[in-house]
Image: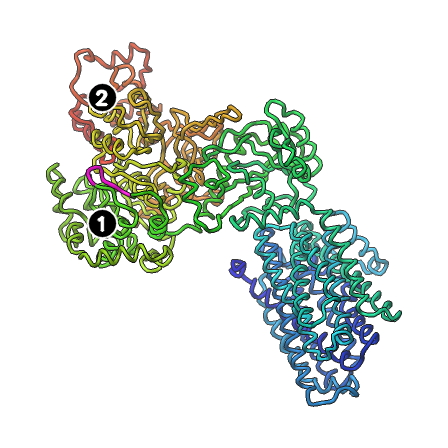
Amino acid sequence: MLSLLKIRGFLAFVAVAFINAFVDLGHKIIVQNTLFKSYDGPEQVILTAIVNGLILLPFILLLSPAGFISDRFAKPAVMRWSARLAVLITLMITLSYYQGWFEVAFAMTFVLAVQSAIYSPAKYGYIRDLVGTDNLSEGNGWVQSATMVAILSGIVAFSLMFESMLSATDVSAMAPSLILQQIAPLGWLLVIGAVVEAIFAQRLPELAPAHQEKVSFDWQAYRKAGLLRGNLRVIWKRRPIRQSIFGLAVFWTISQVMLAVFPSFAESTLGESNTFVIQGAMALAGVGIMVGSMLAGRLSRHHINTGLIPLGAIGVALGLFWLPQIPSLFWSAADFFLIGLSGALMTIPLNALIQFHAPDDKLGKVLAGNNFIQNIAMITGLLLTVVFSMLSLNETWLLYGLVGIAVIGAVQAIRTLPEAMIRVIVAWVMKRKYNLQVLGFEHIPPEGKGALLLGNHISWLDWAMIQMACPRHIHFVMERSIYERWYLKWFLDLFGVIPIAGGKSRQALERVNELLRGGAVVCLFPEGAISQTGQLGEFKRGFERAAADSGAEIIPFYLRGLWGSRFSRSGTRLQANTATGIKRDVIVAFGEPLGCSADAATVKQHVFELSITAWERYTDSLPCLDAAFIRAMKSASGDWAIADVEGDPVGHHRLLTAVLLFRKRMRRLSGQNIGLLLPTSSGGAIANLAVLMAGKTVVNLNYTASPEALTSAAKQAQIASIVTSRLFITRLKARGIDLSGLLEGVDILYLEDVRDAIGQFERLSTLLVVKALPSIVLQALYCRSAHLDDTAAILFSSGSEGAPKGVMLSHRNMMANLKQISDVLNMQEDDTIMASLPLFHAFGLTVTCYLPLIEGVPVVCHPDPTDALAIGKGVARYRATVLCATATFLRLYTKNRKLVPMMFSSLRIVVAGAEKLQADIREQFEQRFRLPVLEGYGCTETTPVASVNIPDFLNTQWWTVQTGNKPGTVGMALPGTMFRIVDPTTLERLPTGEAGLVLIGGTQIMKGYLDNPKKTAEVITEIDGVRWYKSGDKGWLDEDGFLTIVDRYSRFAKLGGEMVSLSEVESCARSVLSLDDRPLVAVNLPDSKKGEKIILLIEGEEPEELQDPRRMLLDKGIPPLIIPANVCWVEQIPVLGSGKTDFGASKQLASSLLDVQV
């Protein structure tokens, strides 16, 4: 609820509401206490009822004028003038006190109420303008709480001062006029309050045009009650508004009569004569309302929780039943608290429903009509109280009469909202485990407008979360075999569930259409079954028939947070990782309405977009990487966390101890950005985490790059300190890589030196601290990362097509991406990751370093991804189940005869990324190792993973397959990520199936390029409130959302005006020339005749059978445009350290061979 305080003007608005109630209540308390001191018995009850009636009467008489003023003029202006008027009124009241004009003071109660009657519709209408429809319950909770605090403080302040001013005087024989003169200084407190109210009212922001439609007030119609009938007609036409006003009228009528009767009851039955004590007891109802308002706001965050209404009504009835039976004022006060709390649980959602369903141009009239009906009911109740008192009916029987009214109201509430009450009870049970957040609440149409809710289906609890998020009753479509279970059918019928059976869905879809035409809300899960993978499955098209010609709106939604729960199909380790012992955050995001003709592909794309919104909200709750690592190490199960292929496994506590020990040394390093020259190893992981825990930024330098590129990277990142290893530097020198130039002029920290400097006592004491202290204490002591959006790592892009660029990735980027990957890989309890990709590559750092250590998955490290035999030994020894590699490395593993297939027998997932996976590499790997290769896609700028294929899943209950893998594609976007295919020039969205520029949106999109805002602006664009990265790739999406990459736009050659894909040239050459085993690359060079020409570089010596490769391509029917102008045989195709082809170096090589300037 505190988030509303950030809204400009909200605090001033709450202050105005508080002071207005304080002033009104203050004068009322003074008059009522004067009556209490001067009269008793029926006369006291009658006069008290008349005072309350005078307060209510203006709300009846001024119904139409107040509504007109609120709709005709800007609501802040109405509130300002009302506040100024209150200053004059309180001055007149103060004068009447000093003069002892009791009758005038009595009458000024009516005048003060006139001011409130004019102000009230503007106040309640302004709430919606100020906080929006999705925060209505919270906004009303704030106003109600502020009002109750004002009432409480008013009761305490004015009653206490009233009694203290009369404490030395015998008032038993004093006339009311003399009592007023005795307490006259209290009038100045009213004046001061009114002045402060006027000051705050002046600070209310204008949120709408100052003048609405130019209309005049029809006084003749007002005198004949025509306007009244018109206002009431607006209310009567809308059932939710009508019923809500009825409920409010019942509660406030009961409250007025109860407050009028109880003082006399307390005096005659409980023997209490002190007004402060009696008013204090009744004030506990205000405390209850305040607490209930906050509770209702909390339970209704971003939505209207109608299930609170019947529960509140039951509580009010019980409280009233106990009130006349309680023998002491102390327990009466407790009972007042219960009645107030229960009443708030009713009134908060009832007020929100009125505001939600009222048309914008009729809001003032509806709210004024609400005031009119409530006040008519309250005055009627007070008049009946007067009548019954005159008939000598004592206070106890009057209180029992209220019980009967409350019971009737509670029964009606239960009859009207049975499913809502059950829903809130279920919600109460669920909220012991789940926190529900609702986004896009304003997209839910008002009552009477049909809506079809369509979204993802990830658990057995989805229906409950969707219903809890929506203020309207929802008819769910459910599999008939589940619906017909005898112990569920009665319950499902109560909620109006629609059963459906596969292959026999016509009747169910007709029923859905009928409901939509009738203005109902229906929810259907287009996937037809709970997701087995956490990803969106195929959207069935049946809903298209159900929605056709219904006139309803299709509301897409995305549900995040239940994947990984025990009610989902997620893996055991993922469930263990998310079972933190605290409440699980569940987010329901509703999208903008679509027309009823929207097809399955369109709806699915909108659901993908909503996943971005939901994941962005989810990432707000994530810790920084260092804090997440501590949590994982303290809670992880299993014997070990990390191991080197040639070393021993390291346990979770030992690993955390090592990181904390190294962190101490990292903090002393100069500079914010710390360079790291380390291989993929346990030492490399420890150093990376230690730097993060020191509050610094990691910059893993690409030791395979040229000296110029390395020096440039260090200079761009302003690196003053480098962490490395003496052994690693020696091994690099043995490979011909000399880094002495880079290491000059910077502080160097060798891991061996740090290790040797740590004494045995320091090791044991730190280990003891790790074992003894809870995670939250360790985080407070050792974590120095300040904010999720701080830069965690700077990675230099692969530079496969040009100079490397420094990519800044935040803690949010990396935490989001590793959570996304963990979700789709569906981690199992026995999973182990084989890590060999270099740490200077985003794939290696995020996926095979941070992901396993933060998700608690054991990881095996090896520094050389080309060492196929060592990789095989590591997988076999530690029974690794997940292997991430590039296509180049997979080719090496396939061709290495020493790597026997049984070494890979434990693998369940093999992911290929960082470069395009050729069909022949996939087929050869699958044939040799009997393992499918799942291709992924991404780039450094997306942290890096944007999409990945996942294994298909066979549902043996329904004998259906959830497709997760389509060979030739790079899979569907990760949850929280979306692809959009656009025209590369206009960025206009292209139809499904048409190729264009691939835009990537999601929580993992980089912060930007290091010190290069111009380049950042070139590749990052904001569309529809989402940051999109222009990937530079050409691709297309199928109807299921699977992405196929055609090529990079930069890897097209323009020959005589025709665009030719260089990847297609490579594919044709590989196929026709039978070059399955040989690395090759096609590049484009300038050409004086056609503008550009294509050069094909092939690694190795030229075979005799390929003397004329161009002729062979032509003979096979390859189009002439795709045939390269030259075929060159080279000793080695240039590659980057990540295993990707170095296109820039390849182009330079071709240029030197043919002596062509580029």
Q: Position of residue 1002 (x, y in %)?
A: 43, 42
Return the mark for residue 675. 1
Would you say 1115 lies left or right of 993 here? left
Left or right of residue 617, residue 68 in this image = right
Quadrant of the rendering where the C terminus is positioned: top left
Q: Which mark is residue 12?
A: none
Residue 789 pos. (x, y %): 38, 52
SS state under label 2: loop
Please, what secondary structure does the residue beneath circle 1 have?
Answer: strand
Between the C-alphas of marks 2 and 1, the distance is 36 Å
Residue 666, placed above or below residue 834: below
Instruction: Give the residues drawn in magenta, as a range.
Output: 641-647
Determine if the magenta segment contains residue 752.
Answer: no
Q: Quadrant of the N terminus?
A: bottom right
Residue 976's spot in the image, x, y percent?
A: 45, 41
In which quarter of the view is residue 219 placed? bottom right
**Of residues 295 and 22, the one drawn nearer to the viewer in this rendering:** 295
- Tag 2–tag 1 contact (CB < 8 Å): no
Q: Is residue 223 above or below residue 923?
A: below
Left of 768 or right of it: where is 430? right
| Among the two numbered marks 2 and 1 on one chain, the one whose residue lies closer to the N terminus | 1
Residue 216 visible in this rendered orientation of the protein = no
Q: Which residue is mark 2?
A: 1078
Query: Which picture quadrant has residue 1033?
Result: top left
Say if 866 sits above or below 727 in the image: above
Of the pair 118 and 618, the residue shown nearer to us: 618
Q: Residues within 10 Å of mark 2 (few under 14, many from 20)?
A: few
